Amino acid sequence: MTLVHPPLVAPMIEGVETEGATVASTNPARPGEVVAEVRLAGPAVLVAAARVAKVAQRGWADVPAPVRGTVIGNFGRLVEDNAETLARLVTREVGKPLAEARGEVREIIDTCRFFLGEGRRLYGETVPSEMPDKQLFTFREPVGVMMVITAGNFPVAVPSWYLVPALLCGNAVVWKPAEYAAACARALTELAQHAGLPPGVLSMVPADGPSTADGLAQALAAGVVDKVGFTGSTAVGRQIGALCGQHLQTPCLELGGKNPMVVTPDADIDLAVEGALFGGFGTAGQRCTSLGTLIVHESVYAGFKRRFATAVENAPIGDPMRAVLYGPLLDAKFAAAYEQHLGLIRAHHTVFGSTAAGLIGVGAPRRGFVGDLDRGHYYHPVVVDGLLPDDELFREETFGPIVGLTTYRTLDEAIELANLPGYGLSSAIYTNDPATVFRFRRGISAGMVSVNNSTSGAEAHLPFGGNGRSGNGSRQSGRWVLDQVTRWQSVNWDYSGRLQKAQMDTAVP
Ligand code: UN1
């Protein structure tokens, strides 16, 4: 099949017609350009989608796992056939550079390839019994209906981390994408549905925040959602966690980060500068794994700062269809929130990296801007020096092109500073000393640690997730995500012909 891009994106639910108000999803590089009109669903539509999913899931779970794996393989091939169209749509709708958008599409294909094989594994275990003529087993069972709520900074790859393993394991999915990335969501859903999913197994329902909260609450109360997967802000994650908790559910929460990078005295400084540039400013700093604060040893601080300033000043910024470090912010809402974070810069901070902090084109120009401004949400790269642990900028995620800089004396002090904001998603250390690596790894609260590499850009088959304000300890990706999308069932099978009582008839001395 070939992807077509319709002007209207409406909820895609088998047998459910929807009507209602639409909002425009626009190109953040040219806000006047509408990528799609998006019909937003109310709470009742979300509940209807979950009810449809509940029925469809039973049949899908009966399909043998290797056959479900074949469908996932088809999905990956369809994405591959349409990779360039999908990547261009990602760039157009959310403004990330085309090279990154291509990488994002690659990540879906890799995820499909990984889970295609999992259809032939999905192992349970045989476990010895403490009694004779008795055998114990474990089976992985699908959770049921999963409601997946995702952000727009990774409009197709991050959703695929939920969709692919959930579907492979026999779940049905209701996916609520970000409104401003709904055209991407529609394209991905169409490819998945064409891969051979039975009707109703995957629905895509754009909705705003209040309708989503209301719809989710109703669906949980009605017993038609069994698991929630959410990638987004810590604040919304807390609300979802509380809501799920009332129904004794544990959601999979992938939240924000204030990701630290430590640069030690023996580090390769050029490598560290390169990693900091990509980590801090790649995707305009709008990854949950983006670099928040650089913690640089005082002995190498001056040299690092000089080279980092030069790299940031010369970084190409502009039209995301061209070869740039970053393009515009995701949409007007994100731009407004980021401007508030710029307001956290205090008198005791020094700012470098650009001639101004704020919107490019308003006030100071950006030397070497690539392409036309076109009123796009383009922001200067900002480095804020002299951060103090009490500064809000030190503690809060900013989700934009701003990086903090501070110094340390001992490794213990660096680890303490790195852990201070209370997030715990990604982290990085640049060093050539193995003992420093292991001490850092043990001391850091982050779920992910990079050594001589950036905080962002995790590979798609390693556990992905965070602790503290970054999530509830759930992990996605690779085989570890199976614990999110399945539940263990244990079976004890007695073929002795009598009632053997565990603990009471046990012969273990
Ligand atoms: C996110 O920003 O929600 O590790 C995910 C990375 C990407 C995923 C980021 N592969 O930076």
Image (cartoon, grey):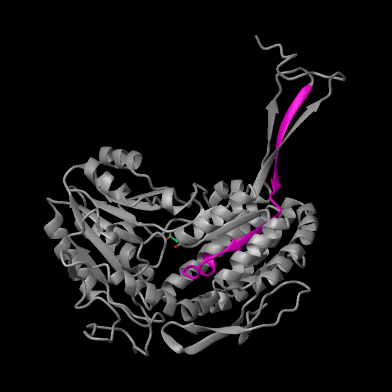
Above or below 76: residue 363: below
Residue 508 sits in quarter: top right
Ligand 1 image position (quadrant):
bottom left
Instruction: In this rendered view, identify the residue nearer to me: 387 or 372.
Output: 387
- Image coordinates of residue 408 in percent, x first then y, are 18, 49
Instruction: In this rendered view, identify the residue nearer to me: 264 or 383.
Output: 383
- Image coordinates of residue 61 in percent, x first then y, are 76, 53
- Image coordinates of residue 27 in percent, x first then y, are 47, 84
Instruction: In this rendered view, identify the residue nearer to me: 88 or 25.
Output: 25
Magenta stretch holds residue 109: no
- Image coordinates of residue 85 in percent, x first then y, are 55, 79
Per the rendered image, the range of residues in magenta is 134-157
Above or below 403: residue 120: above
Residue drawn at the location 26% of the way across and 48% of the way down: 417
Does residue 52 appear left or right of residue 112 in this picture?
right
Residue drawn at the location 42% of the way across and 61% of the way down: 288
Residue drawn at the location 65% of the way across and 9% of the way down: 509
Does residue 321 appear left or right of residue 166 in this picture?
left
